[in-house]
Image (cartoon, coloured by chain):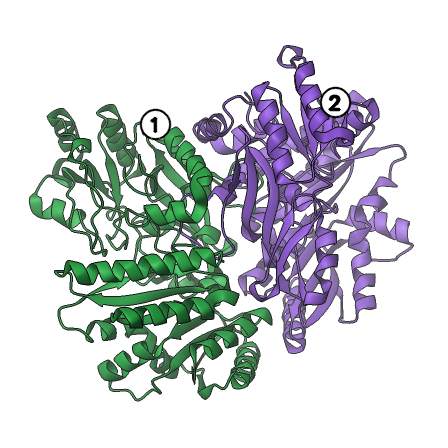
Chain colours: A purple, B green
């Protein structure tokens, strides 16, 4: 993958005094071991690791504040680390510095079932939260592919398959505790469901990728577990007919909980991987949440719409085991694809367009992939207009990687030209800084820069991400 | 109402050169007439008018940018004006300066029915938008009491009765065009339904009340008109039983579109005003949106819950005229109350708490009102934990006004102590700056101040609102 310029001049040696101060503060939760630094210097992107100078494992907001204060005093970069599952180089220590690992901040601090809220430390993962609240009859719906930490999910404004109904971290974060770049602790909101009380600091930090402050606690909305859940699956002759089915469904206000798109390449890979015999055509997978009568009504409406667009083999299921079978295809899509090229690594792209442009955007991108000869598949959270191209590349072949990057760049340009965004849910990290400028224009980027400079005047908070400085 | 300190020293004379430049730019859309300045120097709050030095009527974003550039050059305050319906002194020219009236920016610029989005100039009102899109089968749900402009609604993070189902301006604003304090024009987002592309400039400006920049265009989400609508009404022996009905309804995930609370004083006023004979007890009004079967199911579930909490006279209606009759009470609540004290002015408060604390917050506030001997009523968007106390005061009696302000201050302190907010939907303006500090604490306010200083270093954007400077 194309490495960004790594100006060694910007990486300054970390003073021994800082390392000693952190060592005495964190004791056996401070390390400079190469293995641990390497573990914290990589994510799920294709970048080579970039190692921090030391790693500390914080357990409280106060410890994070102490660590940041020290780094602030010594002008040393600070990088927050949750589960390491970011996709665009978010957590790589481009300029060295101290990584603060938050995975030991894994306490669910409060659950208020009557208010449908929970407050957690930043290191709590989404699956852990759902496990801990399972007896309340509530659940937390946001589901990026990985079992990411809530802090990391807030920091990248993550979403996933349920976003079409339940929204993203933008809509589902009520309040944050944040450590600012000079080590102050602030609370950005309350548990009130709505508020007009001043600047929306919560959403200033949601999506800021650790570049404005470190999120240490997150208060999120919870939802009642639906009384009934059903799933449906059907195939279409073309991607366009599948997407048109989705557009019509959304426009009629059918409150689908999930609607996932898999192109024929995905289906082919899954058939091979799981010994299935799904029609090797575009596939849509639906999930419906509601009352018994409600989910039946939803499924019926969708079936009628799908029929208008020449759907094949509409099948629906309300029993858990049948639903699992229908969704198996989706769950295995990533691993199934990886089997399609020996020794390959998958590059996952991420763009999002207004839904009326989705079919065109997917079809043009598909044609481009085919012309480039890249082994690829497309899956999408199509109810939101969001899709990912998985491209299988040989990580040791620069030409192969460059070809994939070129497809990605053209896809992003296409999405932006359609009034869409360069990233629907993965974030900017190091990889999409140029795309960000392309999307927002210099004037808006200048306003983002003003924000960054004001909140982090020393440029120590995860430097080299989102905004070039 | 208690006037803030109005430091005359901060109000500087506006240079003639600026007035001349604006006059030549706006021609007959520039005025210094006293009547027009006075009209623009007041809102729906109880503050006495504070007049700007001049008013210009802008028709395009570029004209707003030109006006702001001039004011920036001369260090003169700029105040955006929509419909003048703010409630906390948002648009009063505390330090004089130039008011930019945006009401002539009333074009619906684009409607994309397939994507469920519309882009409008800031002066378009919510009713105008709904009128212009009525043939698309879509609607825009956010409904503050007034027929406010979309720019003003975004600037105050407005909501209303539909927020329990459809969210507030926070959730429903996709993108903005904003003129910055130095007169640059930025676009804060795209029409993509979700995005992780950098800092959330959209939500930095939503709720910023003209203090960070001037919103000139707004892209909002639209929703399909529901296939069926039904309404229900029922009374309760106590406020607590009414609120518990709402909590249970929300917790079960019943997707109510509206649920409004009226205390017995509101009902008494309405009975007198409309010659009705509703039981003079706490009243809940519901509206359900969905399919025919869906709204029936919702109403039935709510009826069962209400019965558990001793509801009286549950009545529901699907026909438009019957619904209108049921909702008449709510629509007339404000005017009916005004009739309860001759010559009085209504002070409307606004707080929002986690719903589990709502009954307690309402009951304690009610007891405080009664103890104070103030004629009052309480109405609430209770699904969100948001309620308003209407207090009838003699605006010429300082003791009366002070008594009402004291009740308000205690109510806000109560809401904050319950992890709630000092304003659910009205905003901060001049009136709630101290409450804002009380709610967020000095450290978070300092972070808000950093934002304000960075975005408006000359403090010319609606100065003296939200943050003291």
Rendered-image quadrant of the N terminus of chain A = top right
Whether residue B57 is visible to the viewer of this picture, yes or no, is no
Horizontal relation, residue B306 to residue A309: left or right: left
> Chain for mark 1?
B
What residue is drawn where x is 67% and y is 76%?
Answer: A292
Judging by the rendered image, the residue that carries numbered circle 2 is: A51
Circles 1 and 2 on the same chain: no
Q: Are marks 1 and 2 in contact (CB under 8 Å)?
A: no
Horizontal relation, residue B297 to residue A336: left or right: left
What residue is drawn where x is 32% and y is 41%?
Answer: B210
Instruction: Assign a secondary structure to mark 1.
Output: loop
For residue B55, which quarter of the picture? top left
Judging by the rendered image, the residue that carries numbered circle 1 is: B457
What residue is drawn where x is 72% and y is 30%?
Answer: A26
Residue A36 to residue A365: above or below = above
Rendered-image quadrant of the C terminus of chain A = top right
Residue B143 to residue A126: above or below = below
Q: Which mark is residue A246?
A: none
Local crowd at mark 1 within 10 Å, few (<14), some, or many (≥20)?
Answer: some
> Chain for mark 2?
A
Query: In front: A199, or A143?
Result: A199
Horizontal relation, residue A448 to residue B270: left or right: right
């Amino acid at each position: 993958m194309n490495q960004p310029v790594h100006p060694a001049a910007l990486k300054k040696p970390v003073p021994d005094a800082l390392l000693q101060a952190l060592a005495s503060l964190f004791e056996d939760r401070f390390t400079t071991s190469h293995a641990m630094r390497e573990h914290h210097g990589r994510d799920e992107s294709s970048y080579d690791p970039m190692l921090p100078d030391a790693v500390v494992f914080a357990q409280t907001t106060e410890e994070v504040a102490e660590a940041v204060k020290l780094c602030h005093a010594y002008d040393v970069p600070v990088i927050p680390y949750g589960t390491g599952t970011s996709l665009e180089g978010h957590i790589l220590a481009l300029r060295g510095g101290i990584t603060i690992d938050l995975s030991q901040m894994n306490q669910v601090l409060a659950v208020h079932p009557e208010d449908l809220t929970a407050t957690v430390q930043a290191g709590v993962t989404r699956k852990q939260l759902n496990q801990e609240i399972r007896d309340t009859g509530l659940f937390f719906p946001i589901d990026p592919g990985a079992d990411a930490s809530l802090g990391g999910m807030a920091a990248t404004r993550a979403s996933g398959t349920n976003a079409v109904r339940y929204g993203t971290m933008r809509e589902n974060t009520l309040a944050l505790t944040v450590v600012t770049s000079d080590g102050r602790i602030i609370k950005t909101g309350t548990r009130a469901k709505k508020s007009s009380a001043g600047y929306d600091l919560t959403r200033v930090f949601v999506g800021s990728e650790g570049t404005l402050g470190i999120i240490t606690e997150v208060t999120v909305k919870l939802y009642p577990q639906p009384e009934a859940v059903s799933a449906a699956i059907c195939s279409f002759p073309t991607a366009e007919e599948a997407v048109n089915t989705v557009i019509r469904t959304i426009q009629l206000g059918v409150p689908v909980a999930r609607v996932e798109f898999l192109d024929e390449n995905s289906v082919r890979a899954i058939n091979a991987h799981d010994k299935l015999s799904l029609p090797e055509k575009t596939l849509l997978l639906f999930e419906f949440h509601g009352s018994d009568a409600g989910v039946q009504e939803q499924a019926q409406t969708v079936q009628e719409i799908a029929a208008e667009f020449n759907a094949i083999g509409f099948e629906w299921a309300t029993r858990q085991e049948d639903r699992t079978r229908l969704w198996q295809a989706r769950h295995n899509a990533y691993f199934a694809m990886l089997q399609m090229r020996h020794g390959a690594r998958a590059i996952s792209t991420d763009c999002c367009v207004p839904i009326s442009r989705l079919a065109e955007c997917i079809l043009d991108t598909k044609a481009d992939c085919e012309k480039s000869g890249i082994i690829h598949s497309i899956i999408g959270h199509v109810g939101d207009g969001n899709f990912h191209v998985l491209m299988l590349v040989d990580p040791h072949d620069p030409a192969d990687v460059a070809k994939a990057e070129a497809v990605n760049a053209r896809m992003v340009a296409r999405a932006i030209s359609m009034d869409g965004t360069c990233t629907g849910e993965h974030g900017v990290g190091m990889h999409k800084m140029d795309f960000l400028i392309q999307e927002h224009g210099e004037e808006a980027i200048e306003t983002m820069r003003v924000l960054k400079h004001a909140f982090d005047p020393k440029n120590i908070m995860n430097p080299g991400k989102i905004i070039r400085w």
